[in-house]
Amino acid sequence: MRGVCSCLMATIVAVGVSGCTLQEQVDKTSRAAALRTVVSVSEKRLPGVNVEPIAGCIINQASTNEILTLAGAAVTGITDSTVETVVEIGARPEAVRCIAKETLSGIQI
């Protein structure tokens, strides 16, 4: 219990120092964890590709519940359901547009 209180107190102090609200800090932490999950899934499906821009597009199109689910997978492990969630989000029209823009922007025709 003492460790949990110390960790919670450290988080509260960090939030106070950073000027963020607790909710903003939770959102940032959740998005960062979800991004790690999406990067991991994407790297397995697209080896050798810089997946950071793709993962950013997917995270930006995810709902709050999807962000929390993906963030949870960063802790519990990636499952088939996690991969399906990433693929479903990545197939949304806005995500596809973003991915195309991010990945094709350096190509000169």
Image (spheres, rainbow, N blue to C red):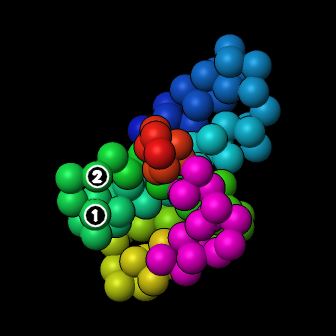
Q: Nearer the viewer, residue 42 or 64?
A: 42
Considering only vertical position in the picture, is 48 above or below 108? below
Q: Which residue is mark 1?
A: 46
Q: Helix or strand or loop: what does disc 2 sit on? A: loop
Q: Residue 69, how many percent across, how many down?
A: 55, 70
Q: Helix or strand or loop: what does disc 1 sit on? A: loop
Instruction: Determine the residue positioned at 68% across, 26% down.
Output: 15
Q: Residue 86, how many percent across, how many down?
A: 48, 72
Q: Give the magenta part as a residue range.
A: 87-101
Would residue 103 appear left or right of 95 to someone viewing this image? left
* Callout 1 crowding tier (Cα within 10 Å): few <14, some 14–19, many ≥20: few
Considering only vertical position in the picture, is 7 above or below 16? below
Q: Residue 10, how many percent across, how many down?
A: 55, 26
Instruction: Determine the residue positioned at 57% across, 76% down.
Output: 91
- On whether residue 93 falls in the magenta region, the answer is yes
Would residue 23 appear left or right of 60 to someone viewing this image? right
Considering only vertical position in the picture, is 50 above or below 19? below
Instruction: Determine the residue positioned at 50% across, 31% down.
Output: 6
Q: Nearer the viewer, residue 44 or 16?
A: 44
Which quadrant holds residue 80?
Answer: bottom left
Residue 107 visible somewhere in the drawing: yes
Considering only vertical position in the picture, is 7 above or below 94? above
Q: Residue furthest left?
A: 48
Q: Nearer the viewer, residue 40 or 24?
A: 40
